[in-house]
Amino acid sequence: MNRFPKRLLGLFAVVANVLALVFLFHVNSWGREIAPDIKVETTPVNRDVKLGISFAPIVKKTAPSVVSIYSTQTIHFRTRPFRNPFSDDPFFRQFFGDQPALNGGREFTRKAQSLGSGVIVSPDGYILTANHVVDGADEIKVAIADGKKEFIAKVVGTDPPTDIAVLKIDAKDLPAITLGDSDQLEVGDIVLAIGNPFRIGQTVTMGIVSAMRRNNFLPGGQIINQYEDFIQTDAAINPGNSGGALVDAEGRLVGINTAIIPNDNGGNQGIGFAVPVNLARHSMERLINGGKVTRGFLGVAPQDVDANLAKSFNLPGQNGALVSDVFPDTPAKKAGIKSGDVIVEFNGKEVADAHSLQLMVSECAPGTEATVKLIRDGLARTITVTLGERPVESANNQNESGNSKPDDSKTDALDGVTVADLSLQTREQLKIPNEIKGALVMEVDPDSNSAEAGLKQGDIIVEINRQPVNNAGDAIKLCGQAKGDQILLKVWHRNGNLSGMHYLGVENTKKESKQKQSP
């Protein structure tokens, strides 16, 4: 009986294992996009080189990667209804009977076109742009820089919280841009903005990085994106530049142009904003590989640390994010993070404020094990937490009634504040959850220390100096017991459909107005 040599059998086994691995790779790849060939350079720009007399070499390198995007959307609308002037006249009604008072308007449709820009990030046709450029579009066309070729693009995915979208066109050997590292940028670095403003054709403008990590920058703190971390630049950005490239002095993509603070005519006045490429890349990679963006979730309500809070919590400075609330059944709760903790580092990176903590957590994948360094009761400690997946954003026992009379000689801490018990009717009117207990703020003297600290009418005081407040009487009592030159409040606050806890540090100094309890 013939037998195969052992060496030959071993070779067959190796080949079979390789084929099996290849088969499994292809099976796992079916039904999803494969990550494109994206070039990334993370070295910082060379700031020791003297400025040249021309940026033409950089423009020649990067401009072919910037495209124009034309999106078309079908809008349905109706004309205004017409009211029959004789519908209520008894004389006409005896002949024609009851007629509709309103004749419905006619329905029309029209095509709305918008213009934006985009950046080719891979030779096989992946394009990075701003979400608002393609949002709601029925058809998207992409024209490459030479203007001689136009493609129909499909939307691979969008991430509205960062205003990022990824498109795909059927093309090969495209001039893909090299991605840089936006964390290496510094204020004063030279940048170029490339796009198609006002439909006049591809345009290049030059400026510097004016500021980093801008958020809540519009009047009144209006938020454009949920995860704002903008690069601010004075390079001219105008309508049509959205989605275009912001490149550094070595021609690497460092941002996606997205917004401006316009002048009265809607044009540029030297203040433009771009999404950092690191944030855009995070969203892009998840959209290409999974079709959606998943973000890490800690489960805390953070707030910035001001001078009063730093003093109240005995902190060395104002860096860090103060945990005003820990939500139940969340990774933070399970890991032992508590309300009143101040998170100063996340995965080894310094936490500057509440916004930076939110960004750090969101950039981690769900299931990531993270280290959190925090300060609790003046002592530093490190906690390990396994992050969950951030849920989709959504708009987010009656107390006994008492009439405690305040002692004016012991109510300096909240001078100018009127408090009341929470009634069932008040809970229903203000949509206060049943689990929230405390004293309702009925009135705040605008000249008081409490108003300066941020206390507002409708807030619920739930703690005073880390002691629970169940009703107005507790608030009066705890204020009377307050020692020192500051008092720490924990407050539940509603802002529109959103609500949450936050801390306030109030100067404990006597003013003319007295704290009082509402009858």
Image (spheres, rainbow, N blue to C red):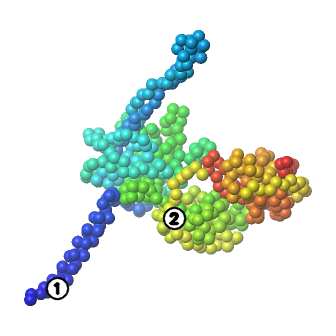
Element under disc 1: helix
Q: Please say whether residue 150 is visible from this viewpoint.
A: yes
Label 2 – label 1 distance at C-alpha: 50 Å
Splitting the image into 4 quarters, where does residue 384 fall? bottom right
Residue closest to the eye, 446 or 80 = 80
Q: Residue at x 12, y 87 (%)?
A: 3
Q: Which quadrant would the N terminus be assigned to in this image?
A: bottom left
Q: Which mark is residue 7?
A: 1
Q: Residues within 10 Å of mark 2 (few under 14, many from 20)?
A: many
Residue type highlighted by circle 1: Arg
Q: Nearer the viewer, residue 501 or 451?
A: 501
Which residue does the image show at 61% across and 64% down from the upper left?
328
Please name the residue shown 43% across and 43% down the image.
Answer: 135
Name the foreground residue: 489 vs 395. 395
Query: From the viewer's perspective, is residue 374 above or below residue 244?
Result: below
Amino acid under label 2?
A: Gly
Of callouts 2 and 1, the N-terminal one = 1
Residue located at (33% from left, 42% from top): 142
